[in-house]
Image: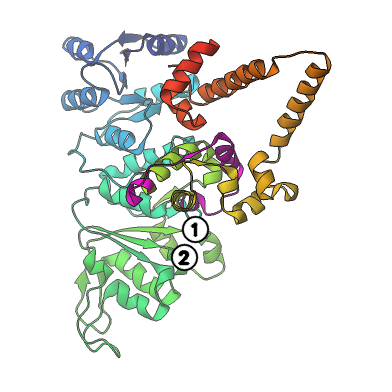
Amino acid sequence: MKPVWIVDDDESIRWVLEKAIDRENIPNRSFSSAAEVLTALEDAQPQVLISDIRMPGASGLDLLSEVKARFPAMPIIIMTAHSDLETAVSAFKGGAFEYLAKPFDISEAVDLVRRAMQENQVSDAPEQLLAATPEILGKAPAMQEVFRAIGRLSHSNITVLITGESGTGKELVARALHKHSPRKNRPFIALNMAAIPRDLLESELFGHERGAFTGAQGLRRGRFEQAEGGTLFLDEIGDMPLDLQTRLLRVLSDGHFYRVGGNQSIRADVRVIAATHQDLEQQVREGRFREDLFHRLNVIRLRLPSLAERKEDIPLLIRHFLAHSAKQLGVEAKRLSVDALEFLMRCDLEGNVRQLENLCYWFTVMVPGQTIEVKDMPQDLIRKNLPQSDTSPDSAGSQPQGGSSDWAALLEKEVATRLAQGESGLMEAASRRFETVMIQAALRHTRGRKNEAASLLGIGRNTITRKIQELGITGAE
């Protein structure tokens, strides 16, 4: 059996993987740089190569490109702590078997190695990516699955059905699928079925000839012709009328269509990506959506998670939207207080990422100060997400969430007890303890990244560095 090769400049990562793979009785060998691997490949080849993406010297993607050029069938697993869409797509476009987001579960990593060992062939490395797609942010496991799917589909022209609640970013994902596909240099055309009057939809999709109906004063090319060679994104496909579903099915079946009022068949070389927030299977059962069309569209289904399923991404999304809105409006970016962030994390945001983005624009325009507090939130959001007794502006500022009064009551009781015992100097001791708890909690949340922790706490980088030293806090990078 050929060994599994591990390359990472972090000795602790190498050690953990070595021990885990040893327990499975799989031979292995470790390297600290891409250069060492390339030298070793002159004399031997591994069964599977596991590589970090960011290392001194040549990166994991550089190594991936070099190894795939020499050994196209070798399964390569890319490890990364930067689990974003561009990393995932770059890895898959480069021919990676899979990518593993750090920190990873050891059993998951071992299972992945075993699957890679059974792999017989991996796609050859293709052309380089073009410029960046619209940004899709997310570190939650559910979003990592979306990134993986986009990466795996990057070689394909296959039809995709995107499902998910309103506001989850279905069009962004459709654009990413297009930008990372063989059709990326051709048009991306989007049409929302729910936004076009029913009697105009057919003409919008397929175009019309002059005189086809009253008001048709000239020839008009429809969305299928506009998207020729590229991608047609049909949003809210569940709202498409049944008679138009029949025409769409014909195009997907034989690749030809007629303009309204026309008699000349037109060939359509178009990739179709459809999206819906509705339950299409239920619509099929009720006779409101054609079953044969459903199966034509449902070749690959990509489900987007709601914001409630990826709450750990909320701080990241908020920082991005606040910075983006500030840049558009030419002002300094605002930041959320700790209480305000905790409040939003507990909110029921039914509009998902779109609602969160709109809130950040509202904050940028409407909040007078640089720090956003709970009392600055839109009143309807406060009324909906705070207990009835806490919905006044004053109580909203002091008690931003249902459980926040508990610790305040405990603190008041503790202070009263200490004062009754004749203690003094409570403010300094309590302040130090308060700051220690806050900073330690933020550092645990960011896995020791103090700059990110400072941002979440609403303090400066120099301040958190000074506080960590003064308070003797450990575990910060």
Helix, strand or loop status at disc 2: helix
**Residue 247: x %, y % from top left:** 35, 73
The answer to the question of whether label 2 and label 1 lie on touching residues, with beta carbons closer than 8 A, is yes
Camera-nearest residue between 235 and 272: 235
Residue 237 x, y percent position in the rendering: 43, 64
Q: Amino acid at mark 1?
A: His
Q: Residue at x 56, y 65 (%)?
A: 285
Residue numbers of the magenta segment: 326-355
Residue 1 appears anywhere in the view: no
Residue depth check, mark 2 versus mark 1: number of the one nearer the observer: 1
| Residue 205 position in % (x across, y down) | 31, 72
Label 1 Cα neighbours within 10 Å, binned few <14 / some 14-19 / many ≥20: some
Q: Nearer the viewer, residue 326 or 292?
A: 326
Task: Relative to 205, say whether 217 is above or below.
Answer: below
Which amino acid type is shown beneath numbered disc 2? Gly
Residue topped by disc 1: 277
User: Residue tagged by mark 2?
Assistant: 238
Mark 2–mark 1 distance (CA, rounded to whole Å): 8 Å
